[in-house]
Image (cartoon, rainbow, N blue to C red):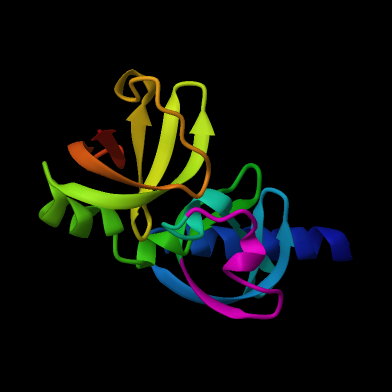
């Protein structure tokens, strides 16, 4: 009977949390996993911050942003009662760097650093938290390596999808 009471109690807490979707809560990082960060919200309720919801910055591992035992502020994104999962975001509480970049950068030349080369082009960090794609059709046979500093023109900014197209 103890397990049934615990499960019922947990379900009640999850249902109460469902009413808080969109609200901001404090929690403590319980652990860092391959799929995201587990955050203890108190009262036997744990939520997950996926890697995509940690920060606007590109990070290789969550430990670059948080550590176990750290208190964090998160926004409740979703509560799935059937799977008993709570989705959280830290990024939602941070200023969107794309908006600041877009106001100042349309059709402007900027200096950036190559962060990743892919078969269809290179990604260039053009602002904190903002990477743009320099498509291979723009490269004119030039090759760039990760870490290279290059000057590019901001050809297009798609705020909805957080994409920046670059040109040489």
The image position of residue 155, as x and y in percent, is 18, 34
Q: Residue at left 42%, top 39%?
A: 123
* Residue 15 in view in this figure: yes
Any part of residue 79 in sight = no
**Farthest-out residue, front:** 142
Q: Give the extent of the magenta segment.
A: 58-74
Residue 53 in the image, given as x and y percentages of width and height: 49, 54
Q: Is residue 14 above or below residue 132?
A: below
Relative to 127, say whether 23 is above or below: below
- What is the x, y in percent for residue 1? 88, 62
Left or right of 40, for residue 152: left
Q: Nearer the viewer, residue 71 or 56?
A: 56
- The quarter in which the C terminus is drawn is top left
Residue 78 at what x, y percent from top left?
48, 51
Q: Nearer the viewer, residue 120 or 101?
A: 120
The relative height of residue 159 versus residue 6 in the rendered view (above or below) is above
Question: Is 17 left or right of 64, judged from the image as shown?
Answer: left
Instruction: Give the number of marks.
Output: 0
Q: Residue at x 45, y 21 (%)?
A: 120
Residue 63 colored in magenta in the image: yes
Q: Residue 151: say if magenta.
A: no
Q: Residue at x 41, y 58 (%)?
A: 21
Residue 57 in which image quadrant? bottom left
């Amino acid at each position: 009977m103890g397990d049934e009471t615990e499960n019922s109690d947990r379900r009640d807490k999850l249902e109460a949390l469902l009413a808080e979707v969109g609200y901001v809560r404090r929690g403590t990082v319980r652990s860092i996993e391959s799929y995201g960060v587990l955050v203890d919200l108190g009262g036997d309720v744990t939520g997950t911050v996926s890697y995509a919801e940690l920060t606007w910055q590109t990070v290789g591992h969550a430990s670059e942003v948080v550590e176990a035992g750290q208190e964090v502020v998160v926004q409740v994104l979703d509560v799935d009662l059937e799977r008993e999962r709570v989705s959280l975001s830290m990024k939602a509480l941070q200023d969107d760097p794309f908006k600041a970049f877009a106001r100042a950068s349309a059709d402007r030349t900027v200096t950036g650093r190559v962060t990743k080369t892919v078969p269809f082009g290179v990604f260039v960090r053009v602002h904190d938290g903002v990477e743009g794609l320099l498509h291979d059709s723009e490269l004119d046979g030039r090759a760039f390596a990760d870490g290279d500093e290059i000057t590019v023109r901001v050809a297009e900014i798609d705020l909805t999808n957080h994409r920046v197209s670059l040109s040489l």
